[in-house]
Image (tube, rainbow, N blue to C red):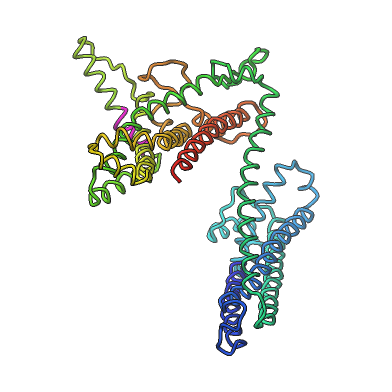
């Protein structure tokens, strides 16, 4: 029996515990629920919790411990000549045996006998069972895989039976506690509170773990490359140089990447901000409810399109359009039909990215303008101001802090964009100031440095963590400042 079967049984026991706990509470109160300290549903929830939580903990912990014991016993049972091989080769053999065990479980007795008699047919049999092997198996692997499969099945069966027994014990114990004075609601609320605390703790620990991993690997990188060379370097060339060269680890200048990141985000914001803001003003003050119900969802659809699709759009449509248009324009002016805008350029990436950012600017700004107290709007109109004057002199000044916060949040999203930049601006780390030439960003280089079968022991890979912590600090500063402005705005009118 698989783990999923035992999981289903435990869930069914939990459902039964809820029904029985609720029914028993009603029976104890003789149908008069007012005699109970808690509503019958709380008794049912208490019974379900006692049957589900301990059993699921036993199942998860037991499977983890059992899997580790089975893996350890398999490694210890490998032949001496295998244990004498390098660790990397031992791991390959170990994982191969693990994969074979899944196929051996599906084999019939006759197929097992055929595989043991003729090892060359084992690979074909396992392939027919959906377990392809990278190389020919060795004779000892068949017995090892069969033992591993048997041990794993025994562990699953033992842990599954134990977890089902724990679920039944929890259900019967919960049913025995049902009484008129039992505080089932308090117990359930304590469990819910503990779940909320655990969820918050997991989120916090995840953030701490991410930051910790970035910092630890960044420290390793700066042990090889001086921080000044990284933060103030103007050349990005992380390739290995010739032996004996002073730049044996290449050059890791951040300035070209940082400039490209800020430049592309700035172009995107310059285009997205007025369009998104004007769209928000129209939807909040001038559009009828029918038009608003159509336009607002259509704008927000843009935010749901995957960024890779925007990248294709830039690569196939926008980039060639800008290139050909610049050639035609330059030819009409000078007679020399040479394009001065590259298909992959800062302008292309910024323009396409702005299309993705428009929904964020418009939606956030619309919510902020709408949140301005109605009394300010009505007071301005009551004094004889027009709608445009009310918007310019009352609503926009009142909503300005919130709009600025929304723009900063949108800018942090633009800084973290990757796929659009890869396809629309290229991967060349150029240090230049023309919006018509290709540049790249920090996120693109993080992907480049971590692409491929690499080990995290060289500056070429460790630099990705230094880039990551730099980008993290930049976006964190933007987000904190944006939240500060938004909070200040909210306190002004609440």
Q: Residue 65 is drawn in which quadrant? A: bottom right
- As for residue 238 lying within the magenta part, the answer is no
Q: Where residue 289 appears, x then y in whole percent?
A: 25, 51
Please state the extent of the stretch shown in magenta in the rendering. 310-319
Of residues 138 and 397, which is closer to you in this image? 397
Q: Where residue 103 appears, x then y in whole percent?
A: 60, 61
Q: Is residue 29 above or below residue 271?
A: below
| Left or right, residue 355 beside residue 23 | left
Q: Residue 152 is drawn in which quadrant? A: bottom right
| Left or right, residue 56 beside residue 365 | right
Residue sitting at x 78%, y 52%: 79
| Left or right, residue 494 beside residue 138 | left
Q: Is residue 149 above or below residue 320?
A: below
Total labels: the figure holds: 0
Q: Where residue 17 appears, x then y in whole percent?
A: 60, 78
Of residues 135 and 263, which is closer to you in this image? 263
List the single residue furthest toward the bottom.
30
Q: Is residue 126 above or below residue 295?
A: below
Viewport quadrant of the N terminus: bottom right
Dominant secondary structure of the residues highlighted in magenta in the image: helix
């Amino acid at each position: 029996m698989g783990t999923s079967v035992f999981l289903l049984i435990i869930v069914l026991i939990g459902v039964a515990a809820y029904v029985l706990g609720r029914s028993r509470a009603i029976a104890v109160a003789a149908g008069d629920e007012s005699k109970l300290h808690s509503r019958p549903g709380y008794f049912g929830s208490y019974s379900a919790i006692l049957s589900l939580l301990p059993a699921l903990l036993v199942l998860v912990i037991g499977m983890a411990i059992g899997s580790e014991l089975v893996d350890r016993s398999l490694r210890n049972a490998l032949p001496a000549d295998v244990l004498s091989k390098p660790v990397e080769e031992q791991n390959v053999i170990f994982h191969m045996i693990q994969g074979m065990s899944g196929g051996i479980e599906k084999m019939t007795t006759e197929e097992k006998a055929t595989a043991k008699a003729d090892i060359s047919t084992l690979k074909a049999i396992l392939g027919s069972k959906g377990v392809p092997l990278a190389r020919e198996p060795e004779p000892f692997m068949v017995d090892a895989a069969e033992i591993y499969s048997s041990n794993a099945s025994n562990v699953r069966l033992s842990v599954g039976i134990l977890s089902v027994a724990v679920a039944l014990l929890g259900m019967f114990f919960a049913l025995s506690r049902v009484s008129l004075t039992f505080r089932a609601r308090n117990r359930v609320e304590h469990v819910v509170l503990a779940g909320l605390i655990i969820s918050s703790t997991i989120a916090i620990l995840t953030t701490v773990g991410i930051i910790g991993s970035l910092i630890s690997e960044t420290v390793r990188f700066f042990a090889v490359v001086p921080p000044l060379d990284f933060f103030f370097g103007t050349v990005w060339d992380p390739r290995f140089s010739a032996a004996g060269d002073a730049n044996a680890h290449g050059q890791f200048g951040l300035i070209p990447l940082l400039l490209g990141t800020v430049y592309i985000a700035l172009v995107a914001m310059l285009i997205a901000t007025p369009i998104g803001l004007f769209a928000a003003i129209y939807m909040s003050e001038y559009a009828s409810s029918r038009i608003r119900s159509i336009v607002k969802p259509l704008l927000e659809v843009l935010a749901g399109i995957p960024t890779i699709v925007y990248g294709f759009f830039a690569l196939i449509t926008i980039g060639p359009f800008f290139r050909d248009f610049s050639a035609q324009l330059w030819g009409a002016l000078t007679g020399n039909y040479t394009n001065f805008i590259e298909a992959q350029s800062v302008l292309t990436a910024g323009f396409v990215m702005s299309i993705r950012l428009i929904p964020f600017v418009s939606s956030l700004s619309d919510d902020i303008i709408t949140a301005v107290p109605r009394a300010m709007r009505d007071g301005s109109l009551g004094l004889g101001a027009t709608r445009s004057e009310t918007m310019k002199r009352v609503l926009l000044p009142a909503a300005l802090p919130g709009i600025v916060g929304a723009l900063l949040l949108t800018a942090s999203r633009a800084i973290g964009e990757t796929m659009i930049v890869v396809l629309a601006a290229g991967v060349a780390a150029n240090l230049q100031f023309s919006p018509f030439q290709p540049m790249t960003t920090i996120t693109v280089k993080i992907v480049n440095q971590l692409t491929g079968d690499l080990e995290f022991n060289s500056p070429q890979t460790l630099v990705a963590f230094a880039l990551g912590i730099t980008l993290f600090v930049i976006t964190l500063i933007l987000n904190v400042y944006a939240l500060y402005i938004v909070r200040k705005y909210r306190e002004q009118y609440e």
